[in-house]
Image: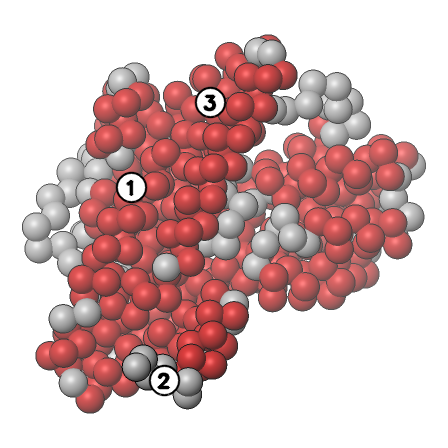
Amino acid sequence: MTIENTDTQPLIQKIKSMGLVSQIIIAIILASLLATIAPESAKSFSVLGQLFVNALKAVAPVLIFVLVMSSIANQKPNNEANLKPIIGLYFIGTLSAAFIAVVLSFLFPTTLTLDIASAVANPPQGLGEVITTLAFKVVENPVQAIISGNFIAVLAWGIGLGIALKHSSPSTKAMVHDFSEAITGIVRLVIRLAPIGIFGLVANTIASTGFSVFAEYGQLLTVLVGSMLIIALIVNPLIVYLMTKKNPYPLVFTCLKESGITAFFTRSSAANVPINLALCKKLNLHEDTYSISIPLGSAINMAGAAITVTVLTLATANSLGIEIDFPTALLLCVVASISACGSSGVAGGSLLLIPLACSLFGVPNDVAMQVVAIGFIIGVIQDSAETALNSSTDVVFTAAASHHLHK
């Protein structure tokens, strides 16, 4: 006779039906309790965190390679005329976001608690060495680049093959797109396991270092969210004013209210596209413009992602004692802005770009992936704020450019 525990089954089913954010919060609470009550037992769960980090290491290079190649290969050729000003604003906004993140990271340097006992960093000696290292990494064999986690070469080969495939047959482009969707599906599966991995990471960290680690995460979040607020409330309004010569704040606040709040809770720019399309219609924008710019912006307008990549990369460098001068940090702005445009459409997708940026400074891949895991821990707030900034800015810049184009 089989005896089923009917009391626990509804609880398990309820947890399964929760969103990823709720599951991560529960995992953090349970891990904190376990580390407080039985610290030695908590340390034994570190294997769950290690498995999660290794899974991220496995999928990240392939994801970046395929996503970049697919997005470039499948670009529509005849939609560029009226989109050029909007695309220009998207890139300026993303680059400005990375720059603000660099400034705040220099003003309020953050360090992270990382396992660096066996890590050997090879920090560059200034901008010249960074550029030289960058050039040599670009020309590495693509298969070896994916195996070794050389994200610079992965990005370069993805761009190169994407450009080459732009003139391929529709069936080839469809195959590349389908392959991209398949890899993204695997990444979603890995990210769905984040609560389990984070449980192991948090339990082991608190058992080893105590609750002081949360104060460290608080400072990191302050820099991240502070950068995003500066972009949303100061930089974006300034860009809109320069385009329209009008008070930008009614438009900015409308977009934050009707697009940003929804995106904060959905944590997906792609899922917020229908909301943004309806908002553009409400703002009486030209449908021929916003019907293209809004879906495009959900994929390439990634100011929040650029901030996340920049802040966490500089925090990693600080943790390893790597000194980065300001010109080298400006190069990081460009790399973060370009790579953010290839950010995955899944929640937390921008975190997988961190190893790419870290590789500029000789940070070992194992250490970079620990930082990615920390990103998932703080993602309860970080990813929500990032998505709110990204999605609301799509409408802000579309409205500003539409006014410029049709005035």
Identify the element where label 2 is drawn.
Answer: loop
Secondary element under disc 3, as helix, strand or loop, is helix
Residue with the mark numbered 1? 58
Instruction: Establish if 24 lies above or below 51.
Output: below
Q: Residue 389: which quarter of the image?
A: bottom right
Relative image position of residue 109 (x, y in whole percent): 32, 60
Q: CA distance from mark 2 to mark 3?
A: 53 Å
Residue at screen point 41% across, 88% down: 7
Answer left or right for 48 relative to 85.
Answer: left
Residue 159's mark? 3
User: Which residue is rendered at x = 22% and y = 38% of the image?
Assistant: 362
Residue at x 49%, y 77% (from the top left corner): 14
The answer to whether residue 206 is visible is yes
Q: Which residue is mark 2?
A: 5
Q: Residues within 10 Å of mark 2 (few under 14, many from 20)?
A: few
Q: Quadrant of residue 145?
A: top left
Q: Earlier in the sequence, mark 2 or mark 3?
A: 2
| Residue that sits furthest to the left in the current view | 118
The kind of residue on which mark 3 rests is Ile
